[in-house]
Image (tube, helix red, strand yellow):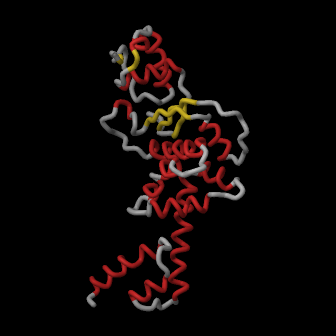
């Protein structure tokens, strides 16, 4: 067998073992005995499993903390189930984590607050690492995201990050998750209703006619507040606003 064919066989055989889908002995049967022994070869699957666990814990620390606080904890099963459904590919560790919020939302018995928590933590990563420039007005959907959660997810996350329990009653919360336009800090803001209208105005998003008729001076003041918070990249004066029919 020439070296190129041997290398092709090696890369064809290893992924299934590294993801614990086939035993090390099956790889040896296909490629030949491992000089360091079957057990040592198989240990690479353990290392990969630990690394995938670490990636998810690093990207979703609040989710991991809440899950691991449960008895019994579902965290290990989540890591295994997610890795089986979305095996890692590519060189970016964050890429492995990308589908976790949607995967978690599809799992039976997972509270809405938990998969919303995963969504929030992923948006923080996504906005922070977003390209500096794009076609979206003010980076909406790139470095700036709008979410309405069934609970105060940012507060739940902050409590989990510092190891504190969360026992507050659910309170639906609208948040802006974004990378600051000038400092590049990862930020979250709970906007006032008028600020949401001003944001829609600046981003060219249609709003109901009644909101489009609000005094422009009030909307400009709300936009100025968003600019000071780093939500808006620039501050245009008196932009036109589109209303929904």
User: Front-most of 132 and 173?
Assistant: 173
**Vertical arrangement, residue 119 with respect to residue 39, above or below:** above
Which quadrant of the view contains residue 199?
A: top left
User: Front-most of 72 and 176?
Assistant: 72
**Vertical arrangement, residue 81 with respect to residue 42, above or below:** above
Identity of the residue drawn at 60% across and 41% down? 113
State the image coordinates of residue 91 (x, y, percent, origin top left): 40, 62
**Vertical arrangement, residue 113 with respect to residue 42, above or below:** above
Which quadrant of the view contains residue 206?
A: top left
State the image coordinates of residue 99 (x, y, percent, origin top left): 45, 52
**Vertical arrangement, residue 76 with respect to residue 43, above or below:** above
Identity of the residue drawn at 39% across and 26% down? 234
Q: Residue furthest front?
A: 108
State the image coordinates of residue 220 (x, y, percent, origin top left): 43, 15
The number of callouts visible is 0
State the image coordinates of residue 177 (x, y, percent, origin top left): 50, 36
Identity of the residue drawn at 49% across and 83% down? 24
Q: Which quarter shows the C terminus? A: top left
Q: Which quarter shows the N terminus? A: bottom left
Identity of the residue drawn at 55% across and 34% down? 149
């Amino acid at each position: 067998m020439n070296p190129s064919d041997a290398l092709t066989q090696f890369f064809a055989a290893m992924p299934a073992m590294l993801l614990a889908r086939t035993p090390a002995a099956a790889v040896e049967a296909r490629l030949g005995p491992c000089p360091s022994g079957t057990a040592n070869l198989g240990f690479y699957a353990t290392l990969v499993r630990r690394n995938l666990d670490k990636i998810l814990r690093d990207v979703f620390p609040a989710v991991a903390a809440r899950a691991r606080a449960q008895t019994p904890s579902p965290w290990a099963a989540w890591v295994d189930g997610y890795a089986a459904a979305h095996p890692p590919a590519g060189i970016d560790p964050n890429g492995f984590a990308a589908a976790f919020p949607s995967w978690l939302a599809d799992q039976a018995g997972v509270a809405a607050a938990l998969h919303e928590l995963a969504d929030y933590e992923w948006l923080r990563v996504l906005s922070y690492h977003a390209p500096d420039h794009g076609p979206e007005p003010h980076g909406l959907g790139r470095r700036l995201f709008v979410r309405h959660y069934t609970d105060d997810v940012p507060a739940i996350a902050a409590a989990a990050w510092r190891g504190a329990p969360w026992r507050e009653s659910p309170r639906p919360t609208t948040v802006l998750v974004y990378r600051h336009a000038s400092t590049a800090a990862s930020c979250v803001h709970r906007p006032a209703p008028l600020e949401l209208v001003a944001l829609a105005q600046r981003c060219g998003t249609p709003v109901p006619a009644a909101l489009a008729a609000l005094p422009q001076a009030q909307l400009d003041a709300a936009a100025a507040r968003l600019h000071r918070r780093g939500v808006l990249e620039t501050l245009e004066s008196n932009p036109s606003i589109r209303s929904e029919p």
